[in-house]
Amino acid sequence: MGTNVKVQTEKKAKEHADAKRMNGSQIVLRALAEEKVEMIFGYPGGAILPTYDEIYKMGIHHILARHEQGAIHAAEGYARVSGNPGVCIVTSGPGATNVVTGIADAMIDSLPLIVISGQVATNVIGTDAFQEADVVGVTMPITKHNFQLRHVDDIPRVMKEAFHIATTGRPGPVLIDLPKDVSTAEGEFKYPESVHMPGYQPTVQPNRLQIKKLSQAVQRAKKPVILAGSGVLHADGAEELREFAEQQQLPVTNTLLGLGSFPGDHSLFLGMAGMHGLYAANMALHECDLLINIGARFDDRLTGSLQHFAPDAEIAHVDIDPAEIGKNVETAIPVVGDAKEALKSLLSFNNEPGQYDDWHDHLKAYSKNYPLWYHGDEKTLKPQALMELMYEETNGEAVVTTDVGQHQMWAAQYYRFANPHRWVTSGGLGTMGFGFPAAIGAQFAEPNRDVIAVIGDAGFQMTLQEMSILQELNLPVKIVIVNNASLGMVRQWQELFYEERYSHSLFPIQPDFLKLAEAYNIKGYKIETPSDAREVFKQGLREDGPVLFDFRVTADENCYPMIAPGKGHHEMEGIRP
Ligand SMILES: Cc1ncc(C[n+]2csc(CCOP(=O)(O)OP(=O)(O)O)c2C)c(N)n1
């Protein structure tokens, strides 16, 4: 026997000895352990029962949601705050279809998720068996990748690839469909050390020449601005972003999802841009001669009318996903790569900053003359004032999750995020029902930090059943209902664009949220005046367990400033009282 063959044979023999025989469910769970998964969120049912049996026997840390949608949004909140993939496990058919919204949400917001869905046995797939749904077909366009397991021997490789795909490049959700017979069949557990995927090789290191072009453009520019998106957060590049902005003295604005990637109280920060962004931020985008997009999608809520978008700017776009570059906005300097690596490379040129004093003064005047505003008074509780006091009483240190609507925009405007991974919101899909369960996942990721779920009275009613988790585990999530007795954002649009025809957007009758809290043994407070708001919030925040605050805010408040549909950044409305 040649030496080479002998070595090979010995290696094979060793591998065989290392391999352990176990069933498919055990293999799946062992793979999760190999991937250092600390907890999973889920809900059991027929097709996934063999796996739940092993979860029981192996003592895996599993959080039982009360609806699969709650489980997947909790997994998203966990992923957003921890930076690790969120894992969600559900049964076939309705269990799997109940997580479709969360999968789509994670896809558009680039959150790493592993979703394991039970499936009917392989011999009945395609026969309309009980609780069968073609989940692979349904989720094909809304997953970064999906798999259907057909053989137990494939499980280790598929699990390894799934985690690799979910967490590398532009993160995203990966679904693994697990037929019941595959989960009970016996096989060997040998976890691969690496993946072999020639067709999937994300570019992490940016091209040095492109970086040089970008660096030269910064030197040429008179009116540059950085637009930082959540790509900076996914790349853990907040520190490098601050260093680069300071080194080159560049003003910075954020997308909604990018908040926290740059300190909210920094002198170079202009505030959030976009539909409800700050006027100074939007005018910086409108008037700049160089727009450096780092890890943002140029989505329509950010750009407003594309026809009017950044008319005088040379556009540079750094993105790990090449499909994003040039998708919506013509780009002169494309840079494919990881945001942190790109920023490190840009920093290494160590250029002197350009002469931007006039530009800074110009933007500062916008900030001074057109700040956020609202009419406060002593008698009524204004939602904006509530956000301000929340910011003050938590020293800006809390993890804040939101649902979707006016409260989301007010939280984004008034809670000045100083740190990465403390802001959890459904940006791309705009999923009502997201905010409260996401706070549960966030609290698991940051057990010692205040986690505040800021939600509307309508969105809360979509997933409030997850108060059961708070009750069961005494999880100290603080629920802040910004209660305007309406679908506030819908009401605002109907007021402004549909001649005040409030079609199905007002809630004259509401549940008693305090009684609901009581049903789940959660402490509740109803607050109706500004004078009570601060004291009660302070007091509730000190509670060790969960608290629900029902803040009765003014019902007819509109969220300003605003870019109306079809308008450009320079046409913002409500920029002054
Ligand atoms: C699942 C879902 N359905 C519908 C919408 C459309 N929508 C966007 S905001 C909004 C109103 C939200 O009301 P509420 O939760 O009370 O928050 P508010 O705007 O009052 O702060 C609606 C219905 C959505 N975003 N998500």
Image (spheres, helix red, strand yellow):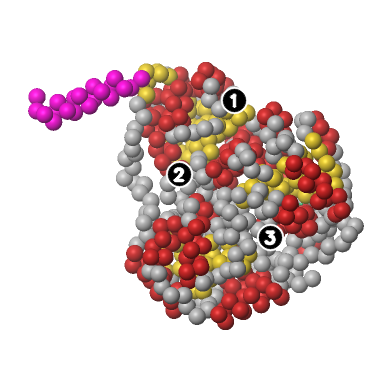
Q: Position of residue 171 (x, y in %)?
A: 48, 47
Return the residue at label 3: 413
Residue 193 locus on image (x, y percent): 33, 35
**Quadrant for the N terminus in the image:** top left
Of residues 124 and 214, the one nearer the viewer is 214
* 91 is higher (above) or lower (below) than 458: above
Q: Quadrant of residue 88?
A: top right
Callout 3: few (<14), some (14-19), or many (20+) C-alpha neighbours within 10 Å? many
Q: Pointer 3 and pointer 1: residues touching (CB < 8 Å)?
A: no
Residue in the picture at 61% in, 79% down = 361
Q: Residue 423: where, in percent of width, then height? A: 62, 51
**Residue 44 bears which disc, if any?**
1
Q: Which residue is mark 2?
A: 167
Q: Amino acid at mark 1?
A: Pro
The earlier-in-sequence mark between 2 and 3 is 2
Q: Quadrant of residue 572?
A: bottom right
Q: Residue at the location (57% across, 45% down)?
A: 81
What is the secondary structure assignment of the residue under circle 1?
Answer: loop
Task: Identify the magenta region.
Answer: 1-20
